[in-house]
Amino acid sequence: MSICEVFGSCVPNSSWTLRTGEEISAHAVFSNAFTLLLKLWRFNHPPIEHGVGDVPTVGSQLTPEYLLYVRNSHLVSSGSVHRDQNKRRLSAVASSSSQNPVFVDSFPKLKVWYRQHQACIASTLSGLVPGTPVHQIVDGLLTMMFRKINEGGQSLISVNSGSSSSSGTRNEDSTLRPKLPAWDILEAVPYVVDAALTACAHGRLSPRELATGLKDLADFLPACLATIVSYFSAEVSRSIWKPVFMNGTDWPSPAANLANVEEQIKKILATTGVNVPSLSTGESSEATLPLPLAAFVSLTITYKIDKASQRFLNLAGPALESLAAGCPWPCMPIVASLWTQKARRWSDFLIFSASRTVFLQNSDAIVQLLKSCFTSTLGLSSSPLSSNGGVGALLGHGFGSHFCGGISPVAPGILYLRVYRSIRDIVFITEEIVSLLMHSVREISCIDLSREKKVTDRTKRYGRVSLTSAMTRVKLAASLAASLVWLSGGLCLVQSLIMETLPSWFISIHRSEKEKGSSEGMVAMLRGYALAYFTVLCGAFTWGVDSSSSASRRRPRILGTHMEFLASVLDGKISLGCDWSTWQAYVSGFVILMVGCTPNWVLEVDVDVLKRLSRGLRQWNEDELALALLGVGGYRTMGAASELIIRDEV
């Protein structure tokens, strides 16, 4: 930040040539430092990840203010206090520059740019006044970028404020680049890019001239690429620009290998059961992209695949991928096709990125992917790749064409790891996971418990073996379900599950509960135990089993609400719609797990609620479990535990 603040305020009147032949100037130093800062900030990942509730996602916290907060936090205590070697090293680095906390106000130029960046994302550009220094810089940059077009003196580009652009008085030598501080240039870049894109949209500038001009701007000050990225990111999300035809004349065409990309995507998704939408747009029409996205991909294609361009492609590449993934189908496959034509060695990565966008188009594909995660993990799939089940079938062995001599199907768990951050409606995921868990329990029962029909007098224990096997797989299904919920939404999604989704599920009437079969009672019991394991694991992932984590402070309120629901049902205050065997198994399993695995949770539950739960368990002849619950409750429940012991002895 200090390097950016100082060198970004310098006028590049001089330069230095290194032994390698590379020329270094104030602009070059600033651009390198600025690019590194943006990578620390993860600027190239647009904010498409939305948290649930009032807790922001980690990505949304990676701002300049947050980076300084992390730096200042290492000054609170001496580096020698930290036991962790990395923390000691970070403390030493933080204190080497200054022993005092540093805030964003210490970097006024950076702060101004950051505020402009946020405003650019929030709304369309406005406020460019003719005759101001910023307007003059905009004119100068447009002249530099499109000097060949404007040599005749005709204005081809106009700034969106309504003022004329470079048609006024110009320097006699229009090829001279303006000698301006980097911060001043960055302030003008959004207006420059907006004017160029507007001119292209109205036919005053060809797509090739647009891409060449933007590349000249980025070459002049490489840090401009960051502002170009932020502008295109904002404009793509606003959806106010008409799409353009990627016909190979005005814009580059993906037709050469678009069909091959579609075939490879189908191979990748072969085991998920998801149908890939067709990439063909009809015989009389070509593939289309939103104008800002088309301009962005055309700009990136102008870069060479070499070491000098790598740091800039690393900045623009992830942003391009995220933007294309967020646009309507088939934008990402088109972008992948265009880039595959330029860099074939990146084809595997690009096609894999395109394949994940299939799941971002509709919720049905996400549900099918989640279902594939369950069937592969539990070994319920007929596919030879996942017939054995387990984590290996869920996550597979990576991705790449080098494994099988060509692109092979990708394990569903790997696909979900690439998709879940981009799911907009994250709340519905919980209900679908609970539904899939219940469906998996029935599938497990059909496979394992149906063997009891074959039990003979010599194999009376075979049924118990089947039940043990079924319980093992039920626990595995519950573990997977809890992992998916925690991964998808973290603390807030788990909170919604325990306080809203599960109570609603128990109260609702389920059609399958009315369809009694010979093994329906066993299925209902297994469902209850599955939900108990699922709930406790979700809580353990979120809060931990003790009080060492900061998230554990929320546990008493959320857990107390759920335990109050259990007690109210046992008291007869709430009617259930689920099978009573499922409810009994859930309550018993939940209490057993709390007593045996998370006793600290019991200490945080209200005493009256514990007594009511204990009384309800005794009505089910679960006296030992009721006593164990009161025993873990500590001194608060000693009286109730004593009364229970005396009653049993009498």
Image (cartoon, helix red, strand yellow):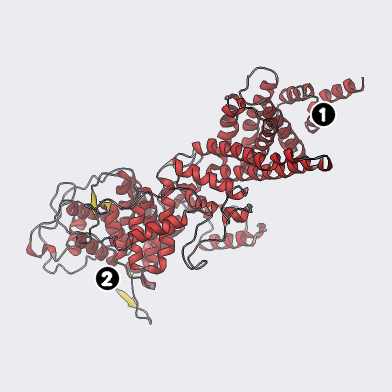
Q: Residue at x 42, y 59 (%)?
A: 264
Q: Secondary structure at mark 1?
A: helix
Q: Where residue 471 sits: x, y (%)?
A: 71, 41
Q: How many marks?
A: 2
Q: Quadrant of residue 13?
A: bottom left
Tell me where residue 270 appears, x and y as whole percent. 48, 54
Q: Amino acid at mark 2?
A: Asn
10 Å crowding of disc 2: few (<14), some (14-19), many (20+): few
User: Is residue 88 among what the camera can see?
Assistant: yes
| Residue under pointer 2 | 13
Q: Amino acid at mark 1?
A: Leu
* Residue 396: x %, y % from top left: 57, 58
Residue 613 placement: quadrant: top right
Marks 1 and 2 close (CB-CB < 8 Å): no
- Going 41% across and 47% down the picture, which residue do you hit? 47
* Along the line of sight, the residue nearer the viewer: 44 or 526: 526
Question: Which secondary structure lies at badge 2?
Answer: loop
Residue 544 visible in rendering: no
In the displayed structure, 247 sits above or below 544; it is below
Q: Earlier in the sequence, mark 1 or mark 2?
A: 2
Q: Which residue is mark 1?
A: 627
